[in-house]
Image (cartoon, rainbow, N blue to C red):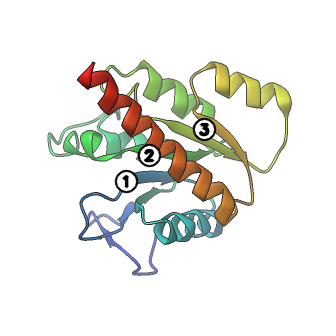
Amino acid sequence: MDTSGSGSGSGSGDFTEGMVGDVEEPHVLAVDDNLVDRKIVEKLLKNSSCRVTTAENGLRALEYLGLGDNNQSSTVNNNVSKVNMIITDYCMPGMTGYELLKKIKESSVMKDVPVVIMSSENIPTRINKCLEEGAQMFMLKPLKYSDVKKLRCQLLQSSVRTSSKILV
């Protein structure tokens, strides 16, 4: 649970959502079980003009996206259209980032949202497995500002590609 007060939560304290007035800012869902890593990713993304919502594990992320098993609120589904990218740690208790990626890619509503996996372990088979399952990118921790700038460029390019597909 985030108690830093840096964002406004959903009331339950499970999510921290950055409140920024500019609607044009991409909205990123950052998922990491480690509070320090989560805060670093959040700060880097906010410094890159992204709106950030954080979740402390894969189940909370699915709940926020309206893909949880006991999804009772129809307002949660409204979050789906608001998320432009998901960045998640690979190694988390309960549900790995890979399992979260698979659930997202299985969803007809969420499958086109780019998912980026982060890990402190550079394991080529793990990286390839994530990329084959549909991850947009695999990044090594600790994330740096230059990594987030690359992410931001990817995010802008994917939204331009989506727009150009619609125009064709």
Q: Where is residue 167 in the image (x, y as percent from the top left)?
A: 24, 24
Q: Which amino acid does label 1 sit on?
A: Pro
Dot 2 lies on which element?
Answer: helix
Check if mark 3's residue and mark 1's residue have beta carbons within 8 Å. Answer: no
Q: Name the residue under label 1.
A: 26
Mark in front: 2 vs 3: 2
Q: Which amino acid does label 3 sit on?
A: Gly
Dot 1 lies on which element?
Answer: loop
Q: Residue 156 carries which label?
A: 2
Label 1 crowd (10 A; few <14 / some 14-19 / many >=20): many
Can see residue 56? yes
Q: In this picture, is 53 found above or below 129?
A: below
Mark in front: 3 vs 1: 1
Left or right, residue 139 beside residue 81 = right
Label 2 crowd (10 A; few <14 / some 14-19 / many >=20): some
Q: Name the residue under label 3.
A: 97
Dot 3 lies on which element?
Answer: helix
Q: Position of residue 154 (x, y in %)?
A: 53, 43
Label 3 crowd (10 A; few <14 / some 14-19 / many >=20): many
Q: Earlier in the sequence, mark 2 or mark 3?
A: 3
Can see residue 1? no
Q: Which of marks 1 and 2 is nearer the N terminus?
A: 1
